[in-house]
Each structure stands twice: as C-alpha cells, then as structure tokens.
Amino acid sequence: MTPITAPTGAFAHSRRAFAAVALTAMVLTGCGSDGSGDGGKRSEPGRSVEVSGTPSTSEQAAFEAMLDRVAQPCTTTGEAPSGPTGETPTGPKGEQSLAPDETPPDEPIEPGAPSEPAPQLSDRDRCASVQHEQRIIEALQALPEPTPAKVRKILNGLDYIDERIHGLKQDGRTTRFHLDLREKGGRLCEAGVAAGEQTDVIPCMAPATGAFTVDKS
C-alpha cells in the first residue's frame, strides 16, 4: 500500500498541541476508498459508519467549481524538483568533476548510489491547501458539539461532497475527518479534527493514483 503522508516544509502548520495530538492518532494508508462517514445516522464514539451513493451532477459541478475558486489565487503550478538538490556535479561515468585547481585523489572515486527525493506537494497544491484550511477551520470553529453528522453537514455546505469525505469518526468530544482534494494530477488531501475553538486542519499527501483510503484502526 502507498501511504498517505503529511508533507514536510514551511507550509505544514504547527498550530495547537491538542489538535496535533488528535491528528497524530490517524494512521493513513492509500489503496482503496472506504467512503466512511455517518450519512446523518447516529454515531458512536470511536466508531465510523458508512455512507453510500454518488454525487448528483449538480453537486459534482458545485464541487469542481469550488475547487477552481479556492485555487484561483494560486497562480503557480510548478512541481517538486525531479532530482535532489545540492548534489556534487558528476562526470559522464559517474565520477566527481574536479575544479581547475583541484588535485585528483589517489584512490578512484566510487559513484554514489542514486537517491530519490522525498515526494512533495506541487506549488499549486501547497497554495490551495492554505485556502481550504482557512475556510474549513473558520466554519468548524463555530460548531458546538461537533458530531460526525454536524461536521458532514458543514462540509457539504462548503461544497465538499460525500464522495470526497473520508474517515469521518467521532473521538470523544471531537470528530476527525479527511478530505480527498486531488485534481488535475495533484495529490492534495486534508486531515482535520473538529474541536470547537481548537479545530485544526493540516495538509497531507494522497497517492498519485488510485482510490483514497483511511485506516480504520
């Protein structure tokens, strides 16, 4: 399984300790959609219930329009560098290039093993994540007793469709959730905890392809 990871960097927010602890409890993997949520049904602490059905044409259109609107301030679409930075230049056979006044070493230089850079969200996804987080946090902070049913209703009111809401689960007096916001080849997802004034939402990275899964453990 390809794990859903929280990206590193300046854009990964460090807000309140309470929310950070709650979000750390979410163990995420990506391989198939669980479609979890309460669908307006009675929920029990520590458990999630299923919601079924597909969005209507109007709901899907509203969702796509919202994604475009939220990402409108994000004018750049650059992707993460395709190779690691700060490498020592190498010659055609993998040998290190030497400066004009540098003396070659006595021993032959062994080419280093190639290293893969850690995957990163694109510039557009990083920018869009900030916009999504601000609007979601603002809406959920005003929600008293955030049950899964209430959180789903708020998210639906913000045009996030049920098909993209995952892992909606009550945990004590808080509710945890994930949003699959992948579009146009992006990998953006959001991990959130609705907890009144301590509500927090942080970006995460979903698999590049395939369905979205939140571990139910």
Image (spheres, rainbow, N blue to C red):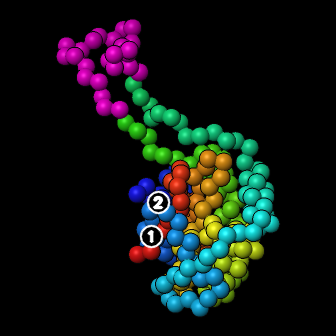
Q: Can you give x and y, in whole percent of width and height, for residue 107 in the image?
A: 19, 16
Separation of disc 2 and disc 1 at Cα?
10 Å
Amino acid type shown at disc 2: Cys
Secondary structure beneath disc 2? loop
Q: Are marks 2 and 1 in contact (CB under 8 Å)?
A: no
Location of residue 52 (image quadrant): bottom right
Location of residue 87 (image quadrant): top left
Instruction: Specify the label residue 215 is tagged with.
Output: 1
Amino acid type shown at disc 1: Asp
Q: Residues within 10 Å of mark 2 (few under 14, many from 20)?
A: some
Which region of the structure is painted magenta? 89-114
Residue 165 magenta-highlighted = no
Q: Residue at x 61, y 70 (%)?
A: 165
Residue 105 magenta-highlighted = yes
Characterize the magenta stretch by its predominant secondary structure.
loop
Q: Residue at x 64, y 68 (%)?
A: 163
Q: Residues within 10 Å of mark 1 (few under 14, many from 20)?
A: some
